Image (cartoon, rainbow, N blue to C red):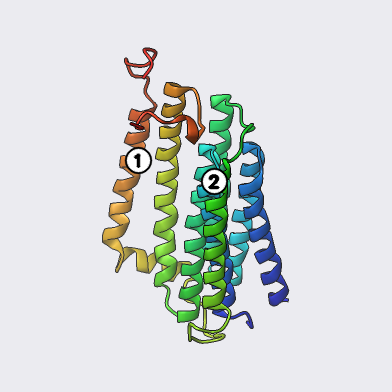
Amino acid sequence: MSDFLFYFFAALIVGSALAVVLSRDAVNAAMFLILAFVGIAGMFVLLEAYFLAVLQILVYAGAVVVLFLFIVMLMNVETRTRRPVQLISALAAAVSFALLVTGVLWLFSRDRITGPASVDVIAPGSGLKIFGQQLFTSYLLPLQVTGFLLLMAMIGVIVLGRKHRAEGKGT
Amino acid sequence: MTISLNAYLIVAGLLFAIGFLGVLARRNTLILYMSLEMMLSASTLALVAFSRFNGTPDGNTFVFFIITVAAAEVAVGLAIIVALFRLRRTVEVDALTSLRN
């Protein structure tokens, strides 16, 4: 059962990621992005990181994609691209994509990374208690730095979103 | 659980490669940015898999921080795209050539 779910979520992730990259409409791409993130959350559940799965759904599929759709709606931009790609850049992208995929498959498919094939220990990150303990003991400083980073991002977005005086005169 | 670590890493690597293809090939800034988010998610998937098979909870904590930073990064990046669109009336990468020559 677990195997079947793994293959299902793997196919979901790869298929919807390809659909994001290949779709011409930005709104369709955002919808497929939701599907890809839901697939990743399913992978997290299979890896017994339940809290991260919920967080993935809430933050990515909820906030991030809604923000993308909001921007598309707000800018009223023509989302369909008439001229999707140039030939030479498409060629370069295809070659580097093929190289990357070949490298990944060559590296991982023949057990070149030695490690435990399967483990049956209690999952480490599943309990919220362990998570909170980690965050507030050994990772206290990164937690506070992250909070400060969020504040900085908020201020930055406000500054960037303000209409400034030079606007309207062109570049 | 019979799925090995390598299977999870293959999925993460494929997702990273597809995102990389999107960043290189697409010209729409919004779709380019979505592809960047997919690459980031691929790295978090690999980290969670490593953490599960290593038996320590630290990888999950890293992923928690990565998700937080990614949310902040998306907000700032989209604000930059909106500012760019206000100034230039386009989101196509090809049209942004003011640094050429």
Residue displayed at 32% across by 16% down: A166
Residue A74 higher or lower than B15, as above or below: above
Label 1: state its secondary structure: helix
Q: Image check: A160 left or right of B33?
A: left
Residue A92 percent across, percent down from the top left: 52, 52
N-term mark: 2 or 1? 2
Residue displayed at 56% across by 66% down: A101
Label 2: state its secondary structure: helix
Figure quadrant of the N terminus of chain B: bottom right
Q: Which mark, residue A153?
A: 1
Which chain is home to disc 1?
A
Residue A124 percent across, percent down from the top left: 47, 76
Which residue bears the numbered disc 2? Answer: A88
**Residue found at the very far left of the displayed protein:** A141
Amino acid found under the numbered disc labelled 1 = Ala
Amino acid found under the numbered disc labelled 2 = Ile
Q: Quadrant of residue B7?
A: bottom right
Q: Give yes or no for contact between labels 2 and 1 (Cβ–Cβ under 8 Å).
A: no
Residue A15 percent across, percent down from the top left: 68, 57
The answer to whether any part of residue A64 appears in the image is no
